[in-house]
Amino acid sequence: MELTLTGGQGLTQQRGLEDLNARFIAYLDAKESTVTTYSKALRAFFAYLAEEGQTRPTRETILAYRDSIRARLKPSTVQTYIITVRLFFAWTAQEGLYPNIAEHIKGAKLDRQHKKDALTAHQAKAILAGIDTSSLQGKRNLAILALMTSCGLRTIEVARATIADMRIAGDSAALYIQGKGRDEKTEYVKLAPPVEDAIRAYLKARGKAEGHEALFTSASNNNKGEGMTTRAISGIVKQAMREAGLDSERLTAHSLRHTAATLNLLNGGSIQETQQLLRHSNIGTTMIYAHNLERAANNSEARIAAALFA
């Protein structure tokens, strides 16, 4: 693939993928996870240009690329890929390398509804009750699930937590967390007594540890004692769900966050309190939970059926 510059100079495939990609990412000054995402998206776009034999891409090229990925990728992925392409060509224009041919091109319309389901209180209780706490690993798993279900934590927030992050907020035990998109641990969640007890029981069984160590550590032979990965935490949650007879693609570790929000609203919590619990910057995100509950409580179909078929 050859991406032709404004002045007519061409870039070889190697330089296009390595030099341009590296310079673009350096310009963004992004976090490692973002770098990985953007690099992958940009390489996918370069691969498309190579397959199509495009050396002078135009706006129509970008539109065709979008249509091609819409046919095989999730809307959220399409959105990410097109955002990356837009950023890339905004940068090439700024650097005088190539015109901004992707300006104002839209990605995909995203459904604001949640992709994962929440658990009922009965289901959540069954999952927690089904965890065997006779072992250190079982005590850890109960503490993780109790924390995520009652506080709405993401897996990354659990993975980042250290022992020293357990502190006091007012008259309550609290866990300070590094939330999504945050660089510091300035926010916290309160630990209800049963949740704190579960964590303390695990730490006691684990034995002496320093404050800087991960709050939850791996029990596998390969990395025993090291901090847990988000993948490992997700696997623990999924296995606990399966053991409780709940096995669905729509039930994952993120379902516990939805469960916390739903149970808080059902039991008298306000929208504002739920927003603070989940640490949503936009209350509109929190409102999705309220709308879902309003729809679930709406018995219009039953009233209509009664009028028609009674």
Image (spheres, rainbow, N blue to C red):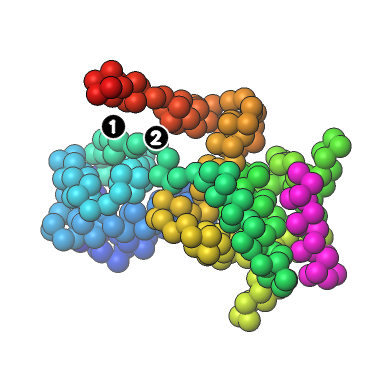
Q: Residue at x 83, y 65 (%)?
A: 204
The location of residue 167, given as percent across then percent down, is 82, 47
Q: Residue at x 66, y 67 (%)?
A: 132
Q: Residue at x 62, y 77 (%)?
A: 220
Magenta residues span 192-210
Up/down of 69 relative to 305, above or below? below
Which secondary structure lies at badge 2?
loop
> In terms of secondary structure, what is the magenta stretch mainly?
helix
Q: Which residue is mark 2?
A: 112
In the image as oriented, which residue stretches furthest toward the bottom? 221
Q: Quadrant of the C terminus?
A: top left
Q: Nearest the camera: 7 or 307?
A: 307
The location of residue 139, given as percent across then percent down, is 71, 65
**Residue 11 included in the magenta stretch of the image:** no
The location of residue 129, given as percent across then percent down, is 64, 57
Q: Mark 2 and 1 residues: CB-CB less than 8 Å, in contact? A: no
Q: Earlier in the sequence, mark 2 or mark 1?
A: 1
Q: Which residue is mark 1?
A: 104
Badge 1 amino acid:
His
